[in-house]
Amino acid sequence: MIRRRFRPLATALVALLVSTAAVTGGTASAQAAAEPYANISGSGSTWSQNALDQWRRNVQTTRAMTVDYRGLGSTAGRSDFINRTVDFAISEIPFQLQPTEVGAQPERPEPGGYAYMPIVAGGTAFMYNLKIGGKRVTNLRLSGATVSKIFAGQITNWNHPEIQADNPGLAMPDRAIQRVARSDGSGSTAQFTMWMSKQHGDIWTSGMTSQFPGNVGATLQSGSLGVAGYVSQNYGEGAITYVEYSYAVKSGFPVAKVLNAAGYYIEPTASSVAVAMLKAQINNNASSPDYLTQILDGVYGNTDPRTYPLSSYSYMIVPTTVRGTFDQAKGRTLGEFARYVLCEGQQQAEQLGYSPLPMNLVMAGAEQIKRIPGAEGSGVDINNCKNPTFEPGDSPESNRLAQTAKQPAECDRQGPDQCTTGTAGASDTDTDVTGSGGGGSAAGAEGTGAAAAASGGAAAADPAAVDAGAVGGDAVYDANGALVSGSVAGGRTAVSSPFTIPDPVWGGPQLLMLAAAILLLGSIVLPPVLSRRLRGGGRKTG
């Protein structure tokens, strides 16, 4: 009698246990059956590092894949690749086979032993720390000529007439400008100085250089975290630097809107970068050593009002031959990681302060994956790529992010009015009109979404300032390649911490945790229920 009554409960418990075991056992079996990934390592760009670090964490969780990376600057990354101390490098510019900067030696990678693969697009932004009457300014605007004069040392005070002309809604303060630049060889510096030399060569006469000149009175800091960390300190009031937009979003600081060729001051959001990159020219000569590198003249002069002019993308430099410690086992890992970057990884680009790659670059990048030894000759299934800029059936030249980009607000047009809406990491803080011009809101236009999207996963930055004279010694980096301590040019070292966002994909570890939770819940809830039923049944049968 008792057995008949409780047989359904017992059957349910057994079914629960069996189904849970099937989930955990199936996942464990699949993982055990799969060949483990060989560890790979890379170095280079800090411009791309916020995205790269998030992707590394994602594949560690979902694929049990270890990808080590140190953000030491693009120049160091290219050098490490040539010296075969890393398996891949990240850079904003290609190998400098014939450098134009004075004193630079040609870089000599193995001919035919490498390929460039685009990984993410973004905007080089101008993060700043400025107050008027004790209140932080979050809506600064700058023309290209003004930016160039600031970093060339020709404009040295925030109340300079040309800065005031860009900002009719602000009564610019009488405060000295601190120019903060990179101390290390960097792709960010190269991209920025190339833009100045091509657009304002009469102002910036040093040409394109990876090493920022030391004769313009700039405060020098190592890495993107270093320059962003310096500007975000109290002693950084009055400072401005060039850095990838992601770092300003992460640090909770604004960036300057830059005047484009259409006469609008634009923030480097995912959409404004996507629009700008539609005018980028790509080297499509597959036999060229610079295949898939970018020519940005069309981006700089793009007349679409939504364009951010300092837009570009970053490269992963991958080996195309077995070399040094790089073998086919590592090639298998690198190929799978590269596929993840081109597809699922792009879903998080906007949240991280970047712009996802369009289909034409994904398809071209997929062809480069096929050249990696051990990547099994397979590229990307474009119909199952899950990249947010396109869907199956779209044209390779289209970009859904660019197609849906909103027009800028009227107060962002060059003229007597100035939008009061904050930018980047300060998008929720408006700035009062203090100048002679009018105000207005950019809230109805595209331009503040990236910070809002990132706010859920970005911890508020609390960078720690360290006196370099007190610390001394060589620079020390953490596991992610971030500067922790040590001496750098410029007197002070500022440290800022990367942020993460949750990965949307559930892998084996998450399923195992869910199964364990179900078992634990069953072991707690079911025994008391069964016990009460058994005692009650015993009394009835007695």
Image: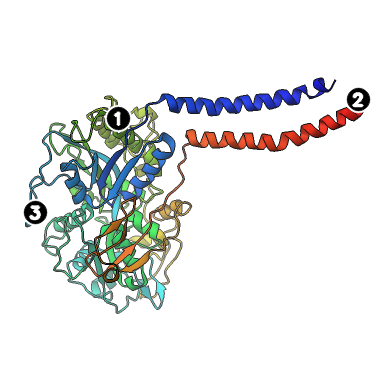
> Would you call the spot at circle 3 few (<14 residues within 10 Å), some (14-19), or many (20 or more)?
few
Q: Is residue 118 visible?
A: yes
Mark closest to the chain's N terminus, 3 or 1: 3
Q: Height in image: 412 above or below 434?
A: above
> Would you call the spot at circle 2 few (<14 residues within 10 Å), some (14-19), or many (20 or more)?
few
Foreground label between 3 and 1: 1
Is residue 209 rendered to the left or right of residue 263? left
Q: Name the mark on residue 541.
A: 2
Q: Height in image: 186 above or below 290?
A: below
- Residue marked by disc 1: 332
Q: Name the mark on residue 112.
A: none
Residue 113 horizontal/vertical position (percent): 15, 34
- Identify residue type, mark 2: Thr
The residue that appears at 57% across and 36% down in the rendered structure is 514
Between the C-alphas of marks 3 and 2, the distance is 95 Å
Residue 308 horizontal/vertical position (percent): 29, 53
Viewer-proximal residue among 420 and 190? 190
Q: Height in image: 417 above or below 54?
A: below
Q: Height in image: 157 above or below 524?
A: below
The residue that appears at 28% across and 52% down in the rendered structure is 46
Residue 523 horizontal/vertical position (percent): 68, 35
Q: Quadrant of residue 404?
A: top left
SS under mark 3:
loop
- Residue marked by disc 3: 104
Between the C-alphas of marks 1 and 2, the distance is 67 Å
- Identify residue type, mark 1: Arg
